[in-house]
Image (cartoon, grey):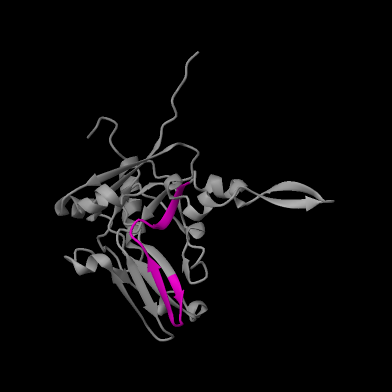
Amino acid sequence: MFFFKTKKIVVDCFTTENALHEAFHPDLSVYYLPEWWKNFPKTFETKVKGIPIDRPTIRYCDGIRDLYKSGFVIPFWSDLIINSTENMYNYHFSHQDGVQKFEFIHTHNEKQYGKNFDKFFHLKIIVPWILKEKTGVKMHFMPPFWNYPDQMNQFFICTGTIKAKYPITPNVNFFIERKENTLRFNSGDPLIQIIPQSEKEIEIKSHLVDQNEYRRLTSVVDYNSSFLRHYDKITKKLVNKEKTKCPFGF
């Protein structure tokens, strides 16, 4: 009898910062189970006809346990504070107190998402990682909902599906309400959960590279070859190029 080992989904993660590579690298979701959930009692007692009966709590929820067995998490690499009012917002990352090597937060023009979100500010966190996964499996972005019970109604992370067959920067879009409020996130907290649409085992590899290699990884897909959908157009050409490779290796 022959046994064939199922190939893994390998996600390669590249950064230029040693602190991120060593301490704040992407890792499997299971390592980000919320502390409140792990410390919560598994049962509570109720009475039926005067008889004490143990009942299960959220600790027995298969949906939560299976969620954290799926995919991987990109954590915050820095503390972040966002202050907002009805008319504006400000933010500060703790790493901005040192050498400013990263871009921070961008926003899209309101015309790009219409009037449906008038009550919110749009923010895009620029993530200092590049992801690459050679098979092109679809990967779903998920908000780490259960990790923020105290702030769950104060910000909304946008979901979506990506492929990383060619290098991508997994920037995170979210909305905050136009009101007086303060949001706080700590380095090491989960920023986004990414779940490949596959039953295969996932392996996460972190790579420390220099600036030249980092730019090389993104130089093709970040090239603005057109005003609209430049990423889609370039990746389509790359896919077609792979399909038409000469069978003799030329």
Q: x, y percentage for residue 92? A: 29, 72
In this rendering, does residue 14 appear at all?
A: no
Q: x, y percentage for residue 77? A: 30, 58
Q: Is residue 98 left or right of residue 75?
A: left
Q: Which of 243 and 67 is in front in this view?
A: 67
Q: x, y percentage for residue 208? A: 21, 47
The secondary structure making up most of the magenta span is strand
Vertically, is 6 above or below 154?
Answer: above
Magenta segment = 175-196
Residue at 74% x, 52% y is 46
Residue at 38% x, 41% y is 135
Residue at 70% x, 51% y is 45
Extreme-right residue of the structure: 49
Q: Does the magenta stretch include residue 243?
A: no
Residue at 28% x, 50% y is 23
Q: Where the C terminus falls, by quadrant?
A: top left
Q: Is residue 33 left or right of residue 126?
A: right
Number of labels in the image equals 0
In this rendering, does residue 105 appear at all?
A: yes
Residue 5: quadrant of the picture: top left
Vertically, is 3 above or below 207?
Answer: above
Extreme-bottom residue of the structure: 87
Q: Is residue 231 left or right of residue 42?
A: left
Q: Nearer the viewer, residue 23 or 178?
A: 23
